[in-house]
């Protein structure tokens, strides 16, 4: 293995050093096949684009590896075989290895029910084994889907994750009945490692896997703020124009198990070699990880054409050759690998661009090296034939019938489809990004011709539209007209009916979430993170109720529920005359062995009344201060 930097004289060398794309590190011989591989990645091999790091492996060694595109557009750092990238769900095989090592050490069994290690799980978890949880046949609902359905933002740590998982009312299906991809079992596996060993998955994997294999640049990310040498940034295309934007996940470093591995194509070669050498785990574990899982009816857990899920890996055939594979995505990172055990050959494509398509790239690279031993590529042939067929004209009315909000019953996911037409770019040169931007330009321009710039496919067109002049409010003493163009903002609120049991579960979860919210605010008051100025009284509650009522009955009832929980929690504070104070007094009397005197109780009650009165004064003062601030702001805009 050696590095090639082509040059004929000093001038060319100087140009290479100043041009990041020309200074790519290349490992292995750049033979004819490598040249053909380079052509596959030609679109990324630029100084103004993210791209991919490629690893081609043969007989336990790197045959060809290099980077295409930039690891950092900001700092002009090119991708290389030593660039560190997040590989998303490719991480699952490392979590699987960790669990199987624990099984080999006698700390668990794949056939144990997960509830043995998570007694807080509902009763249905008694019928879900680790084998099902690690083979995508458990029926466990996916954490990310459940988080998305709540409509809330989470800190994204393990506590949040487990709270959502253990309150999931039921599985998607009977365990072992079918295959359905989910990340939840892997989150539980990572937590099981901690509960059984006292070590995080990151610590355990470093000790048992990465260290022994010499994978010095590989880790489970446990700190999103950690400084990682050679770490690539991740990107996606900038919407509405050329260029790129940074794409990150707000949950980076928060949850391990289903993802979180940061590695290089160089290090990943050491891991791939372990499937043959079995240095870590042993051949029995390797066999378990690469054996297709069987469903209850004895058929394989089919995950795609010719593929079935094993334990953290998919196994099957690709164009007639046995293959082991997995893909992954996280933030803007995308990754895929293919391992052909009979040929002792593998390909890994780790990319830092959302639209990179690493799975198809890996398949094309494999075809260059193994094409003479593969069957004809019927999938590619079908794709080409389909693309050559004439498009069928479909009326707009037919397409509109397919637009709407749709729910995937199996996954519980909600998706919205719409008929895609023109994209409004700007009006009179003013960029339009939101519906509010459109109103801000159109409303003051009643009866005035405006230049609307739209994007239709790959073309940009300019249309002249004159907004209608409509009376803003007939009741005003001074008539005011505004411009309108017949466009309304779509209402995408989704109402979903659930069963009685699930409704109880959701209600219970919502109640405790509100309790936690109130408790957290009280904690912040004590620690100084929140101010007494943040509290509101009757006027603030009235204003919030009016706003909620305007949004609909659902919003109003949610506010009332929150206020009820708020009052219940406040009533439990250890303040005399409240229930919390009475509880404290009863406990104190039990410890003392006799009741307090009537005079003492009266004094306690007076202290409580004073405390409540002071609290009422504070919140009323806050209400008045807010009203005064609003009034002053209004007057300042007038005068």
Image (cartoon, grey):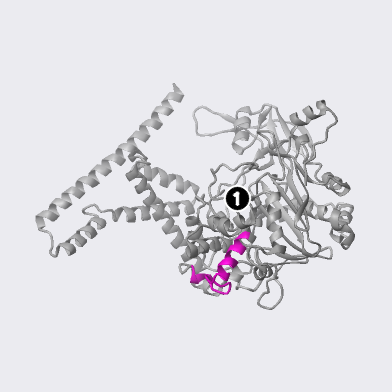
Whether residue 515 appears in magenta in the rendering, the answer is no
**Residue 385 rendering spot, x and y as whole percentages:** 89, 56
Q: Nearer the viewer, residue 87 or 298?
A: 87
Q: Quadrant of residue 412?
A: bottom right
Could you say whether the residue bearing mark 1 is in a helix, strand or loop?
A: loop
Compared across the picture, whether 257 is left or right of 428 comes to left
**Residue 576 rendering spot, x and y as whole percentages:** 21, 53
Compared across the picture, whether 145 is left or right of 353 comes to left
**Residue 166 rendering spot, x and y as whole percentages:** 49, 64
- Relative to 109, say whether 639 is above or below: above
Q: Residue at x 59, y 36 (%)?
A: 436
Q: Nearer the viewer, residue 486 or 274?
A: 274
Asked whether residue 401 is in view, the answer is no
Q: Neighbour class for label 1 at 10 Å: few (<14), some, many (≥20)?
A: few
Whether residue 101 appears in magenta in the rendering, the answer is yes
The residue range painted magenta reads 94-117
Compared across the picture, whether 471 is left or right of 459 comes to left
Q: Quadrant of residue 434?
A: top right
Q: Residue at x 55, y 49 (%)?
A: 253
Number of numbered discs visible in the structure rendering: 1
Q: Nearer the viewer, residue 134 or 415?
A: 134
Q: Tell me the quarter of the image containing the C terminus.
A: top left
């Amino acid at each position: 293995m050696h590095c090639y930097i082509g040059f004929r004289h000093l001038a060319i060398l100087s140009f290479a050093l100043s041009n990041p794309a020309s200074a790519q590190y290349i490992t292995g011989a750049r033979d004819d096949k490598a040249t053909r591989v380079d052509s596959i990645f030609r679109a990324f091999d630029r100084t103004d684009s993210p791209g991919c790091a490629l690893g081609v492996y043969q007989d336990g060694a790197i045959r060809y590896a290099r980077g295409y595109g930039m690891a950092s557009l900001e700092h002009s750092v090119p991708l290389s075989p030593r660039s560190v990238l997040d590989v998303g769900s490719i991480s699952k095989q490392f979590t699987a290895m960790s669990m199987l090592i624990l099984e080999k050490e006698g700390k668990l069994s794949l056939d144990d029910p997960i509830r043995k290690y998570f007694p807080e799980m509902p009763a249905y978890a008694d019928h879900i084994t680790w084998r099902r949880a690690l083979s995508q046949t458990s029926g466990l609902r996916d954490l990310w889907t459940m988080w998305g359905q709540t409509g809330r933002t989470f800190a994204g740590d393990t506590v949040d994750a487990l709270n959502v998982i253990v309150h999931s009312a039921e599985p998607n299906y009977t365990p072992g009945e079918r295959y359905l991809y989910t990340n939840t079992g892997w989150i539980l596996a990572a937590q099981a490692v901690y509960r059984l060993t006292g070590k995080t998955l990151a610590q355990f994997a470093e000790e048992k896997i990465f260290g022994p294999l010499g994978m010095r640049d590989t880790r489970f990310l446990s700190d999103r703020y950690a400084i990682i040498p050679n770490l690539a940034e991740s990107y996606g295309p900038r919407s509405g124009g050329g260029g790129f934007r940074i794409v990150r996940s707000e949950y980076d470093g928060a949850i391990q198990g289903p993802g979180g591995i940061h590695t290089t194509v160089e290090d990943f070669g050491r891991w791939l070699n372990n499937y043959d050498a079995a240095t870590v785990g042993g051949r029995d574990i390797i066999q378990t990880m690469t054996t297709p899982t069987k469903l209850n009816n004895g058929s394989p857990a089919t995950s795609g054409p010719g593929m079935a899920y094993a334990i953290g890996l998919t196994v099957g055939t690709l164009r007639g050759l046995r293959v082991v594979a997995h893909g992954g995505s996280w933030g803007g990172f995308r990754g895929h690998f293919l391992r052909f055990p009979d040929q002792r050959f593998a390909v890994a494509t780790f990319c830092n661009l959302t639209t990179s398509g690493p799975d198809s790239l890996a398949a094309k690279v494999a075809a260059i090296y193994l094409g003479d031993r593969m069957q004809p590529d019927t999938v590619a042939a079908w794709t080409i034939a389909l693309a050559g067929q004439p498009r069928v004209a479909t009326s707009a009315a037919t397409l509109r019938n397919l637009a709407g909000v749709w729910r995937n019953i199996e996954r519980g996911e909600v998706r919205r489809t719409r008929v895609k037409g023109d994209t409004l770019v700007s009006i009179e040169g003013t960029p339009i990004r939101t519906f509010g931007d459109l109103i801000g330009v159109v409303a003051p321009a009643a009866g005035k011709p405006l230049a609307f710039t739209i994007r239709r496919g790959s073309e940009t067109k300019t249309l002249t539209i004159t907004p209608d002049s409509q009376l803003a409010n007939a009741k005003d003493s001074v008539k005011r007209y505004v411009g309108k163009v017949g466009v309304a903002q779509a209402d995408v609120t989704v109402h979903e009916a659930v069963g009685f049991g699930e409704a109880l579960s959701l209600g219970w979860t919502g109640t405790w979430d509100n309790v936690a919210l109130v408790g957290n605010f009280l904690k912040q008051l004590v620690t100084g993170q929140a101010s007494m100025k943040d509290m509101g009284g009757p006027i603030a509650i009235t204003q919030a109720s009016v706003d909620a009522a305007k949004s609909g009955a659902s919003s109003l009832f949610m506010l009332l529920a929150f206020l009820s929980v708020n009052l219940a929690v406040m009533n439990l504070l250890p303040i005399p005359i409240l229930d919390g104070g009475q509880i404290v007094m009863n406990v104190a009397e039990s410890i003392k062995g006799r009741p307090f005197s009537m005079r003492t109780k009266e004094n306690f009650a007076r202290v409580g009344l004073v405390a409540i009165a002071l609290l009422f004064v504070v919140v009323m003062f806050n209400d008045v201060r807010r009203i005064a601030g609003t009034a002053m702001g209004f007057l300042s805009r007038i005068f």
